[in-house]
Image: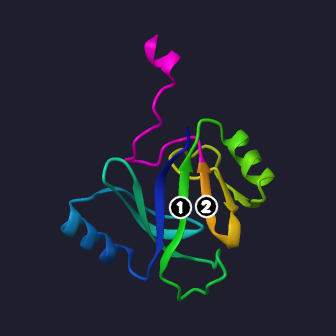
Amino acid sequence: MAKLRHLAIACKDPDAMAEFYMKAFDFTVARRGDGPLAYGVHLTDGTIDLALLRFKSDQIGKGMDYTGLHHFGILVEDMHEASAKALAAGGKHYMDQENPERTGGFEVKLYGPEGVLFDVAEHPWEGTEPLAAPVKQAAE
């Protein structure tokens, strides 16, 4: 079963926002990064990755000054199958991960209803809870 494991917030100062959430809720830093899409700090509560990101391009059509919820990420067992189902249900492909060697981030970005952007990934985001093992596999 697919699980929500990632929320991304567009912000102007990821470091200051991270400090707030660490002080207010004892979240910890899973990683910091400056990549081709954004600079950001990824916090975790042990289950979900909260990415606080200063984007380098406008992916959602709200302009570069937009702050707020940007996208969410879903952890799945089979990225190809999940992407195909989303596309068949009316989703639209946005982009594939540029670095297939990287794990712990999105593999495919898609737009859902009303242009809402989301990630599909087979690999857990750093600091997040993985999918439960299927019952048969867990019994072995």
* Secondary structure at numbered mark 2: strand
Along the polypeptide, which appears first: circle 2 or circle 1?
Answer: 1
Q: Is residue 70 left or right of residue 21?
A: right
What type is the residue that disc 2 sits on?
A: Phe
Instruction: Tell me the residue at 72%/48% (across/down).
Output: 83
Q: Nearer the viewer, residue 86 or 66?
A: 86
Residue at the disc numbered 2: 118
Residue at the disc numbered 1: 72
Q: Nearer the viewer, residue 74 or 17?
A: 74
**Within-10-Å neighbours for mark 1: few <14, some 14–19, many 20+:** many
The picture places residue 68, in percent across and down from the top left corner, at: 47, 78
What type is the residue that disc 1 sits on?
A: Phe
- Outermost residue, top direction? 140
Instruction: Tell me the residue at 61%/61% (across/down).
Output: 118
- Whether the residues at callouts 2 and 1 have beta carbons within 8 Å, the answer is yes
Residue 137 in magenta stretch: yes
Instruction: Tell me the residue at 41%/55% (across/down).
Output: 49
How is the protein colored in the picture?
rainbow
Question: Does the image show residue 128?
Answer: yes
**Within-10-Å neighbours for mark 2: few <14, some 14–19, many 20+:** many
Q: Is residue 103 left or right of residue 12?
A: right
The picture places residue 90, in percent across and down from the top left corner, at: 78, 59
Q: Main secondary structure of the magenta part?
A: loop
* Secondary structure at numbered mark 1: strand
Q: Quadrant of residue 89?
A: bottom right
Instruction: Tell me the residue at 53%/89% (across/down).
Output: 65
Q: Is residue 58 left or right of residue 131?
A: right
Stretch of the chain drawn in magenta: 121-140
